[in-house]
């Protein structure tokens, strides 16, 4: 445990960024535990299993011709065989219809478990702040 494990987790997040940017679904599959639970930005309330998580990414990939994925201000807390991290993230790029978009910043939390010596994502949660008065997500904030 320690700096080595934190560096390994940070490398896993960097690999997520690389594989999302490349729209590499098969490459992403290796980063998630088979029973990953994702509280993603889109319905339903919970996506369970790698297939469901990858289907969510595939839907994102279908919107973009060119895609960039960015994770900013990542904080990682590491235990013996579990860890968590939190950051801001956004997808941006050129949509299939040719429109360029800066995307929106979301909040992301990652839960990791060390399985057979590898840090895998066992949980993630993506959210935007809520304007309580209107009941709508606030999607124009910047970190």
Image (cartoon, rainbow, N blue to C red):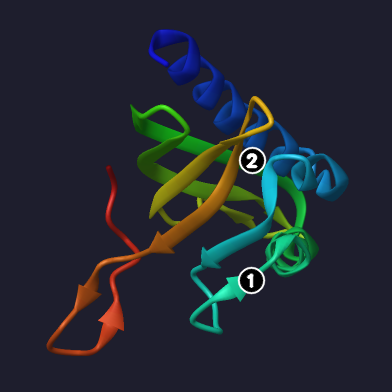
Distance (Cα) linking label 1 and label 2? 25 Å
Q: Which residue is mark 2?
A: 68
Residue at 49 percent of width and 55 percent of height: 124
The x, y position of residue 77, in whole percent, is 32, 30
| Quarter of the rendering occupied by the C terminus | top left
Q: Which residue is the extreme one toward the top? A: 3
Residue at 48 percent of width and 18 percent of height: 5
Q: Secondary structure at mark 2?
A: strand
Q: Which residue is the extreme one toward the left? A: 133
The x, y position of residue 76, in whole percent, is 35, 30
Towards the viewer: 67 or 100: 67
User: For this view, does 112 lie left or right of residue 27?
Assistant: left
Q: Quadrant of residue 72?
A: top left
Answer above or below: position of 62 versus 17.
below
User: For this view, does 131 lie left or right of residue 124?
Assistant: left
Q: Which residue is mark 1?
A: 48
Q: Earlier in the sequence, mark 1 or mark 2?
A: 1
Neighbours of disc 2 within 10 Å: few (<14), some (14-19), many (20+): some
- Callout count: 2
Neighbours of disc 1 within 10 Å: few (<14), some (14-19), many (20+): some
Q: Quadrant of residue 83?
A: top left
Mark whose residue sits in front, 1 or 2: 1
| Quarter of the rendering occupied by the N terminus | top left
Q: Mark number for residue 2?
A: none
């Amino acid at each position: 445990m320690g700096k080595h494990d934190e560096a390994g987790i940070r490398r896993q997040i960097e690999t997520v960024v690389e594989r999302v940017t490349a729209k590499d679904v098969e490459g992403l599959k290796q980063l998630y535990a088979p029973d990953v639970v994702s509280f993603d930005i889109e319905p339903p309330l919970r996506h369970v299993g790698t297939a469901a998580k990858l289907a969510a990414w595939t839907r994102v990939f279908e919107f973009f011709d060119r895609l960039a994925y960015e994770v900013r201000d990542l904080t990682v807390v590491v235990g013996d065989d579990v860890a968590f991290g939190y950051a801001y993230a956004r997808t941006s790029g050129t949509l299939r219809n040719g429109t360029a978009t800066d995307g929106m910043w979301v909040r992301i939390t990652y839960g990791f478990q060390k399985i057979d010596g590898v840090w895998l994502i066992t949980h993630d949660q993506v959210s935007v702040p809520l304007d309580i008065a209107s009941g709508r997500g606030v999607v124009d904030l910047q970190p």
